[in-house]
Amino acid sequence: MKYFFKTNLLVLVVIVFWGCGESEPIQTDLQKLETIAVGPLFEGVNTATVEFDIQKILPTGVKKEQLTEVRIKGIQLSLVNTEAPTPNSFTVLLASPNTSMKECGFLKEESIKINNYKVSLAEEQEFLVEILQDKMQTLVIDFNLEGDWYDDLSVTAAIDWELKIKN
Amino acid sequence: MKKFKILAIIFVGLFLLTSMVGDSEDADKLVGVWEPSNKKIKVKIDKISGKYYGKIVWLREPIDPVTGKPKTDKNNPDESLKDVPLKGFRMLKDFVYSGNGEWSEGTIYDPQNGSTYSSVIKLKDENTLDIRGFIGLKTFGRTDVWKRLIMKNKK
């Protein structure tokens, strides 16, 4: 009985120490994702999407389930086809099969007019851990077109992640 | 006897396949442009990675009378998202088809007060939806009737 108590105490201490461990940042490259809206596209709000797995950009030996803190430091958008009409607003969202879709940021007409495609980010980003730990992720970009476009339209998002794992 | 077993397996397989196709077709009946009873907005519902989402594609009053600019989601509880354009805003999220013309597990956002409610959608007929928003129990909520926007052919 005494032995049993000691073992349990030891396990508890190990769990507490593991839980209190500092999160360590990990280095990842800028993630470039090309979203596609299948044409023809008509004036108004359209959507470009792409599915991805964050695991592919994590360093070898690191699993997405280990992620404890996630923030987006920056998102830069760019249009692949320069002949396509320039949308006058963009909203960037992330979703996954077992979580709710969330707004990550947006771009307003004022920024687009001065060729600034740096997305204004959402302050609240706690939901990102759960999304990135899911089996796959979907990047959604909603954009507002002022005219029709009879082809596909691609928007590339370069995402700068700040990722931390627990050792 | 062996022949009978093979036939039975093929029959069951075909039955499952046709019922799955039927389910998927039923689920996609939600896709389209819909108008709530107050007719202030039009919402386009589309399917992304197996779930259904609705975004505002038209506003009866797109310009904010105070700022003179396109309306934004000024009631969003996240301060940093108050400037997100209302046109394009996803107010229906994460609906999953649960059979019998019903979509559940979703949420509906009310831009007028910045609140998000749990929601279920019921297809009453091809062009009519009952959308129920609730907090906690389904009993304590409100149902709105949405109509499908039907495109008229040009003559």
Image (cartoon, helix red, strand yellow):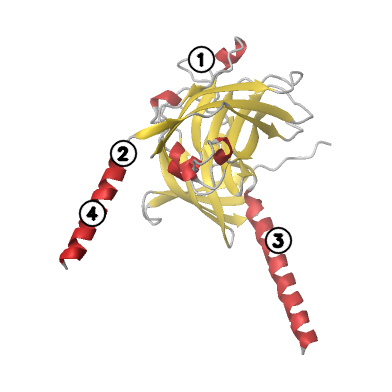
Chain ID of residue with mark 3: B
Q: Chain of mark 1?
A: B
Kindly indicate the quadrant of the structure image that contains residue B116: top left
Image position, residue A41 (x, y; %)? 73, 31
Q: Check if mark 1 and mark 4 are on a common chain.
A: no
Q: Residues within 10 Å of mark 4 (few under 14, many from 20)?
A: few
Lateral position of residue B60 relative to residue A148, left or right: left
Which amino acid type corresponds to the residue marked 3 in the rendered image?
A: Val
Residue at mark 4: A10
Residue beneath label 3, please? B21
Q: Are marks 1 and 3 in contact (CB under 8 Å)?
A: no
Separation of marks 2 and 4 at Cα, in angstroms: 17 Å
Residue B22 seen in render = yes
Residue appearing at x 76%, y 26% in the figure:
A149
Asked whether the residues under marks 3 and 4 belong to the same chain, the reply is: no
Residue ID for mark 1: B68
